[in-house]
Image: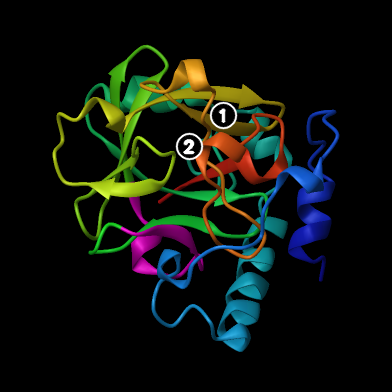
Amino acid sequence: MPSLRWIHENLEPPNVEEESSDIDDSCSSDDSFEGNNNRDDKAEAKSQLSRVLSSAPLDNYQNGNPAAVASIPWSLVHSKIEQKPLQLKLLARTGYCVGIDSLGRVAGVDADDNHARLFVRAVADGIVRLQSAETGRYLAFNSTGRLYGELNMNNDSNDWEQWSIGNYSAFRSRRYAELDWWLAIKRNGRQLPGPKSLRGHTTAQFLPIVL
């Protein structure tokens, strides 16, 4: 059975050199969800996710099949969410899904975690809002570049530009676009602060898994 790393590395990622020195793996413990320190549970979740992704050929993504597990083109996502929001998970190339808990903390979570379920809502052409289906909070950056769950749906920090990077998607904060702050999840599951994020880095590349 191919590993999650093998699957990611064989999806033809964009030609971008990974600068590991730019990524700080140190982070305070309050960025992670309770219970996320169980390595056995994480290993099992990743193993399950590997089996799911290995059964979804890249052709499904390229053909724009809405039933594909791996992803669908964002042009179809936008056309659908004009009528009704889609529910999905954002799987980072680092092996975690983006999650927002009830306290507004953002971190990488396992694929079977309820906090990984997100609603994607269209705001304008190429602009989306990502809302937790579990907690109702919106994904946002604060003024220091920390990801958090915003309760006010009208906060302009909730808006994200959706960009395509090869077979992946990336999300840049619309409010902090001039600062070039991107949604990113590190290999240890912790969020990467906006000032340290890079568009071409694997931490900022995601596969949308439509539910």
- Asked which colour scheme the image uses, the reply is rainbow
Q: Amino acid at mark 2?
A: Pro
Q: In this image, 27 relative to 23: left or right?
A: left
Tag 2: Cα neighbours inside 10 Å, few (<14), some, or many (≥20)? some
Q: Residue at x 85, y 28 (%)?
A: 15
Q: In this image, 89 relative to 167: left or right?
A: left
Q: Count all numbered tags in the image, as a single digit.
A: 2
Residue assigned mark 2: 66
Rendering quarter of residue 11: top right
Name the spot of residue 145 as percent of width and height, x first. Answer: 44, 39
- Asked whether residue 171 is drawn in magenta, I would say no
Against 109, residue 158 (above or below) is above
- Asked whether residue 108 is drawn in magenta, I would say yes
Which quadrant is home to the N terminus?
Answer: bottom right
Against 42, residue 107 (above or below) is above
| Residue segment shown in magenta | 105-118
Q: Amino acid at mark 1?
A: Gly
Residue 93 badge: none
Q: Nearer the viewer, residue 103 or 90?
A: 103
Secondary structure type for disc 2: loop
Q: Nearer the viewer, residue 3 or 147?
A: 147
Q: How far apart are labels 2 and 1 at the CA level? A: 6 Å
Asked whether disc 2 touches disc 1, contact meaning CB atoms under 8 Å apart, the reply is yes
Residue assigned mark 1: 64
Q: In this image, 161 relative to 54: left or right?
A: left
Against 70, residue 188 (above or below) is below
